[in-house]
Amino acid sequence: MDFATVVRERRSIRKFKNQDIPDENILELINLAAHAPSSGNYQMWHFLVIKNQEIKEKMSQLVADKVDELVRRVNAQPDRDPKRAVAWFTRAPVVIAVSTEKYRTTIDNLLFHAGYSELEVDSLRCRPDLQSIGAVIQTLLLAAHFKGYGGCWLTGPMVARPALEELLGIKPPRSLAAIVALGWPDQVPPTKTIRPLEEIAAFIR
Ligand SMILES: Cc1cc2nc3c(=O)[nH]c(=O)nc-3n(C[C@H](O)[C@H](O)[C@H](O)COP(=O)(O)O)c2cc1C
């Protein structure tokens, strides 16, 4: 498969065959993904590979509980069950919790010394730690597709991030950024159209 095909054909997979991925193959994917660019080359990512069904179900339950709490709190009657979009990942044979750690550059420290708050620094600097996590997850998903696996990037479950971090033992300064569901694909997603180039690209000459 050439590079353009890998990029074009990668799709989010949410239905998986009931078949494990050997640990060494998962590590191979992570090792490929770890070539992604990162802010200051800090490589601040960590991958916690969860194969244990009980833990996956506990994670999903925490997310579902949080969504239920929010629905009750706003007295909402959503037309679509919000849990369907965020708590389905238990069906994946492999769930990878990707965590990050904030990386402070010289510029960040300059801003802190100048009296900027953490919130202001985050807003100005556009969270390079999270952008780096985005790069590594996309590289992981491309590598997975290249090897014949299917995956899906999920941030919806982060609605229950503190509870998930406690369950998974992710402690400060690390924080959970996303989870990735991985397995052998058992679906062909419908074709996706991408936005035309004239809408998404411009030049300043
Ligand atoms: C940052 C990010 C967060 C996402 N979170 C979720 C999620 O919580 N649940 C889910 O089912 N899909 C999630 N997705 C997958 C998107 O829905 C999917 O990428 C998008 O619909 C485009 O489809 P494609 O990946 O097949 O090209 C997420 C994707 C990204 C990049």
Image (cartoon, rainbow, N blue to C red):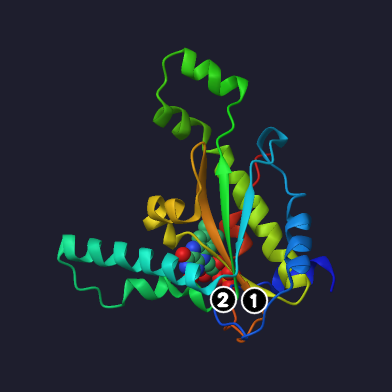
User: Residue 102 location in percent, x, y?
Assistant: 55, 35
Check the image and report above or below for 16 versus 171.
below
Between residues 43 and 119, which one lies in front from this camera angle? Answer: 43
Q: Is mark 2 within 8 Å of ligand 1?
A: no
**How many residues crowd mark 1 within 10 Å: few (<14), some (14–19), many (20+)?**
many
Between residues 35 and 188, which one lies in front from this camera angle? Answer: 35
Q: Is residue 49 among what the camera can see? A: yes
Please give left or right for residue 19 compared with residue 88 in the image. Answer: right
Check the image and report above or below for 144 versus 32.
below
User: Residue 92 location in percent, x, y?
Assistant: 56, 76
Q: Quadrant of the C terminus?
A: top right
Q: Is residue 194 among what the camera can see? A: no
User: Residue 82 location in percent, x, y?
Assistant: 33, 71
What kind of residue is marked 1?
Gly
Q: Are marks 2 and 1 in contact (CB under 8 Å)?
A: yes
Residue under numbered circle 1: 183
Q: Residue at x 52, y 32 (%)?
A: 125
Tag count in the figure? 2
Q: Residue at x 44, y 34 (%)?
A: 123
Q: Quadrant of the N terminus?
A: bottom right
What kind of residue is marked 2?
Ala
Q: Which mark is residue 92?
A: 2
Which quadrant of the figure has residue 6?
A: bottom right
In the displayed orientation, state which residue is furthest to the right. Answer: 2
Earlier-in-chain disc, 2 versus 1? 2
Between residues 60 and 9, which one lies in front from this camera angle? Answer: 60
Report how far apart the C-alphas of labels 2 and 1 lie in the structure. Answer: 6 Å
Check the image and report above or below for 102 versus 54.
above
Check the image and report above or below for 176 versus 63.
above
User: Residue 68 location in percent, x, y?
Assistant: 26, 67
